[in-house]
Amino acid sequence: MTTTHPLTEASVLADITTMLARVLDEYGGLDVEVTADTTFHEDLGLESIDLVEIGALLAERYGERVNLAEFLAEKELDDVIGLRIGTLVDFVLAAAGTGA
């Protein structure tokens, strides 16, 4: 299902927070406040397999143009490990055609 409402930083952040809660539910839940500065690995403890699941949820929500695997493939390993939620929000806004 793709989105039909206008995308904003706040709406994308809310969507990603919901996706994170869904993924982290199997680990006991989302126990930190998610902000643009929250990191996937250090703050949330996500592993690469979790990013695959987030990628699938993003594509389901925003369409195939939001391809997290392609986005991450262009990054250095340290950049992937240090990935922040705000970087992902900017990526979704740009990939979904709204610009960041």
Image (spheres, helix red, strand yellow):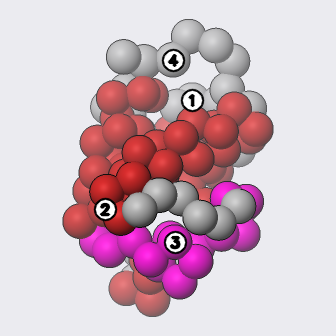
Which mark's residue is nearer the viewer, 1 or 2? 2
Report the magenta stretch's main SS: loop
Q: Which mark is residue 50?
A: 2
The correct choice, above or below, for 45 with respect to 97 in the image is below
- The extreme bottom residue here reads 78
Which mark's residue is nearer the viewer, 4 or 2? 2
The correct choice, above or below, for 85 with respect to 18 in the image is below
Q: CA distance from mark 1 to mark 4?
A: 12 Å
Asked if disc 1 and disc 4 are in contact, CB closer than 8 Å, the reply is: no
Q: CA distance from mark 3 to mark 2?
A: 10 Å
Q: Residue at x 67, y 59 (%)?
A: 34
Q: Which residues are magenta?
A: 34-48
Where residue 72 sits: x, y (%)?
37, 65
Q: CA distance from mark 4 to mark 2?
A: 22 Å
Residue at the disc numbered 1: 97
Residue 38 belongs to the span the image colors magenta: yes
Secondary element at image label 1:
loop
Q: Quadrant of the C terminus?
A: top right
Q: Residue at x 36, y 16 (%)?
A: 1
Residue 95 belongs to the span the image colors magenta: no
Q: Residue at x 66, y 44 (%)?
A: 13
Residue at the disc numbered 3: 44
For badge 3, the amino acid type reads: Leu
Asked if disc 4 and disc 2 are in contact, CB closer than 8 Å, the reply is: no
Q: CA distance from mark 4 to mark 3?
A: 26 Å
For badge 2, the amino acid type reads: Asp
Q: How many marks?
A: 4
Residue at the disc numbered 4: 3
Asked if disc 3 and disc 2 are in contact, CB closer than 8 Å, the reply is: no
